[in-house]
Image: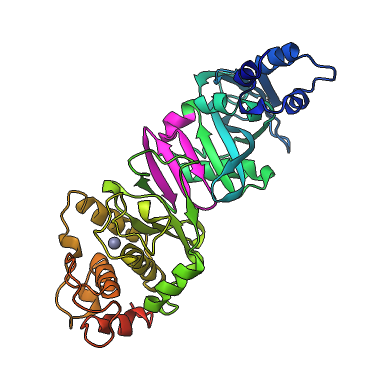
Amino acid sequence: MTTLETRAIFGHGGNSLEAARASMGVNRPASVRTLAELYRSDVVFEAPLDTAGGVALGGHQRLTVSRDGSYTFEGHFRATGFPSYDVALVTTLGFPIVIAGAPNGAAQFAFTARGRVSGTNEPGQRQYEWLEKGQLPQLQAEWHAVRTSRLSHKLHYDTDWFGPAGDIVGFVAQVVALGATFGASGVAIVVAGAAAEHFNVEHLVLPGIVGVIAAGGASYLFGPRIFIPVFIAGAAATAAAVKQRKLYDDEQIEMDKIFKGKVPYNRVLLTNLVGWGGRPFTAPGPGGAILVNLGSGYEKPLTYTGKGGEELNVRAPGQLLAHELTHAWQIANESFTPEYYCRAMDTAAGTAGGNMSAYIYGNAGGDWHSFNTEQQAKVVDDWYAGKQGGTSMQSTYDPMDEVLNPYYMYIRDHIRTGIG
Ligand SMILES: [Zn+2]
């Protein structure tokens, strides 16, 4: 058997046949042929569904995964006494993976089943059985890890935790909790079968504290009670493609010439995501993070001259970062409400077609609050760049001019005081 054939069978685990041998529990001496046959054979995970504390409910589950990524998830619940139960099960198949921005990543494939079993207190079926078949390309791609993965589950019989409208937040929290055995700081979740239909979600990646969901070809930033559609240069945002980082020291020093300590830089996470229309945006994220999504400006925001995409020389160097950090300032210094997400999305959607009116602000002298959030951010980024008027590319003043530029008053009286 050639190396190429070995690779074809063992995938990216093929560079370590010894690891494959160990993962399959095969003793030495092991022939490649034996290993190959075993490696390609189905993996079966089985577990009883036990309950504690005198709950008259039991069951069993079995998950069979094949080399081509197809799976069968089957089992039953059974009422064994007087009471009846509405049962909901979430089962995860988990293993460690590498996620950008997360030191210990874990993958969690989530499977669910739900049904009602009747006790002797009512007529009806004692037993509920399910059988779900499907195929997930990720199971095929991660085959080596799948073989050594771990089955976890949580059985609910007291509340219908799926919720009437499909509580994705509660569901995700449970899946993440089931993966806690990995000590994971980032979790990639693949939602299979019925659960994917129920929640209309197929693929979820939580690298660190940035959550990204992929469903139906689009991706969504996952924050408290909200999804925001996100993209990476027109492509779906996948685990490998999402980048995130803190500000570098030189970036923080440069931006602090504007904000003078009034942006909580330790909460700021830059990402390479963009929103509707390929536009950068800033939004509160889980865990107190402020997600500053810069698109193509992510790598070198101090020298980047674009508006989030590949087109350059349409902004001054660093102007986009100054703009988005002003939104971070707003989030930190104005009382936060979830409506901020809506404003961010509305504005982004409203400007997707090139209508820039949301950004055009009036003359200096008026009240800071006469500017909407976008106009405020534009006032600041124009002042940073020495420009004027919202859309002008002409430099009217020196960058960060504190003498002649009439808009400096807003920097002095609001930005640098933290008074929104
Ligand atoms: Zn903005």
| Residue 366 percent coordinates (x, y) | 18, 81
Instruction: Tell me which residue sits at (47%, 70%) in the image.
Output: 250
Q: Is residue 413 left or right of residue 262?
A: left
Q: With respect to residue 379, does 219 lie above or below?
A: above
| Residue 270 percent coordinates (x, y) | 44, 58
Q: With respect to residue 378, does 307 lie above or below?
A: above
The way the protein has been coloured in the rendering is rainbow
State which image quarter holds ligand 1. bottom left
Does the magenta run of residues contain 4? no
Number of labels in the image equals 0
Q: Is residue 294 at least partly visible in the picture? A: no
| Residue 215 percent coordinates (x, y) | 40, 35
Q: Magenta residues, as a range?
A: 195-223
Does the magenta run of residues contain 219? yes
- Residue sitting nearer the eye, 139 or 125: 139
Instruction: Tell me which residue sits at (31%, 66%) in the image.
Output: 319
- Residue sitting nearer the eye, 408 or 213: 408
- In the rendered view of the protein, which quadrant contains the C terminus? bottom left
Q: Is residue 273 left or right of residue 371?
A: right
